Amino acid sequence: TPVSRLDVPTSGVLVMALGSQGSTSANYVLAQFAGRLATKTYHCLCSGNVLGRIGSKAVRSAFLSIVQRDDTKRAFVSTVAGQEAVTLLRVKAHYQLAGPDGTQDGSFTFAE
């Protein structure tokens, strides 16, 4: 049973519950979302400057503007207006990518 559509304008992850609509399992999961007890964890591989030491925590924020395009809504980072999105992140690992000739091609940070 479809229970919730997370972050529709960005990723649109669909949460499902085992059982029919109105079942105990569906109602339980719906109650978790209604009571704001459900949490989300995203994992991200970021290219560019290192975000911090492994284990360090940081806060990043940006303004998101939701735009209607055709039948879908999409979120875009805006420099002038929109709803503020605050992201708390923890650095899990750093990676260096070597190019075809063996020279360093890029720095990456794995964060959650």
Image: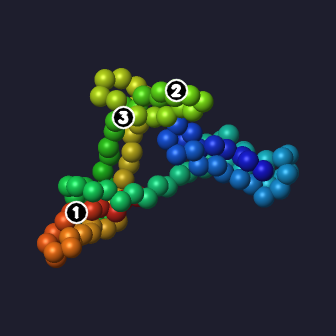
| Residue designated by label 1 | 107
Decide: is 57 above or below 92: above
The percent coordinates of residue 52 (x first, y second) are: 23, 58
Residue 35 seen in the figure: yes
| Quadrant the C terminus occupies | bottom left
In terms of sequence position, does the residue under pointer 1 or pointer 2 come before the other? 2
User: Is 23 displayed left or right of 53 in the figure?
Assistant: right
* SS class, disc 1: strand
Decide: is 75 above or below 1: above
Q: Nearer the viewer, residue 67 or 82?
A: 67
Residue visible at 24% across and 69% down in the picture = 97
Picture disc at residue 22: none
Q: Nearer the viewer, residue 58 or 107?
A: 107
Residue visible at 31% across and 56% down in the picture = 46
| Residue designated by label 3 | 77
Q: What residue type is labelled 3?
A: Val
| Residue designated by label 2 | 68
* SS class, disc 2: strand
User: Is 63 displayed left or right of 105 in the figure?
Assistant: right
In terms of sequence position, does the residue under pointer 3 or pointer 1 come before the other? 3
Q: Which amino acid does label 1 sit on?
A: Ser
